[in-house]
């Protein structure tokens, strides 16, 4: 996949560092489990591996209600999300609403990479919200 199509919405370093060390969560990046069965199987594995938080890949291919049901079932929270650039360009408000609905309360920062691996200057300008 060309890196130019990927944007990362990640935790703000300031927010993370302001949290006491004992309260910081290490989240599982769901992309690493993309080839492991269904979403439910992936979340089951995340929980059984000791994680209490996940970083989403887009909307994980399910509705916000279904994702909330599964997150609750496996006692997981959302810390951040990787979102396709196209979703941000065409459905920014919906993407933000989805993430807020599933508990992603982190500050929104975009890291946009070009296929060369270098950040794209200004790719996310004016897209930062909270």
Image (cartoon, helix red, strand yellow):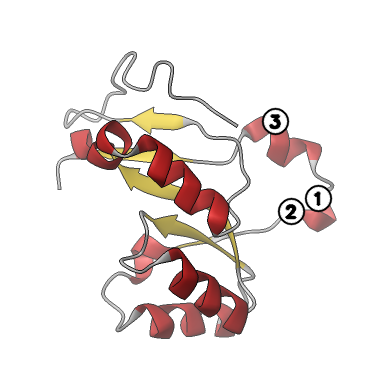
Q: Name the residue under label 3.
A: 14
For image coordinates 74% across by 37% down, the residue present is 17
Which residue position holds label 1? 21
The relative height of residue 126 versus residue 63 in the rendered view (above or below) is above
Q: Which of marks 2 and 3 is nearer the N terminus?
A: 3
Q: Distance between the residues labelled 3 and 1?
A: 13 Å
Closest to the camera, between mark 3 and mark 1, is 3
Element type at mark 3: helix
Q: Locate residue 9, reporting x and y percent.
A: 46, 40
Dot label at residue 24 = 2
Left or right: 72 as drawn, with respect to 83? right
Residue at horizontal 31 percent and vertical 23 percent from the top: 119
Secondary structure beneath disc 1? helix
Q: Position of residue 22 (x, y in %)?
A: 83, 57
When asked about the image quadrant of residue 120, the answer is top left
Q: Is residue 41 visible?
A: yes
The Cα atoms of the two marked residues, 2 and 3, are separated by 13 Å
Q: Which of marks 3 and 1 is nearer the N terminus?
A: 3
At a point 42% along the width and 38% down the height, the residue shown is: 93
* Quarter of the picture holding the C terminus: top right
- Residue ID at (37%, 77%): 39
Q: Residues within 10 Å of mark 2 (few under 14, many from 20)?
A: few
Q: Residues within 10 Å of mark 1 (few under 14, many from 20)?
A: few
Q: In this view, does 9 lie to the left or right of 101?
A: left
């Amino acid at each position: 996949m060309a890196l130019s199509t990927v944007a990362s919405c990640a935790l703000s370093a300031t927010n993370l560092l302001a949290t006491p060390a004992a309260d910081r969560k290490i989240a599982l990046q769901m992309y690493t489990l993309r080839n492991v069965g269904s979403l439910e199987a992936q979340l089951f594995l995340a929980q059984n591996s000791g994680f209490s938080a996940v970083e989403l890949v887009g909307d994980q291919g399910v509705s916000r209600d279904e994702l909330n049901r599964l997150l609750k079932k496996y006692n997981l929270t959302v810390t951040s999300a990787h979102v396709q650039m196209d979703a941000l360009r065409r459905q920014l408000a919906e993407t933000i609403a989805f993430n807020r609905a599933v508990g992603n309360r982190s500050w929104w920062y975009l890291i946009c990479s070009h296929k060369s691996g270098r950040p794209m200057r200004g790719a996310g300008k004016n897209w930062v919200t909270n």
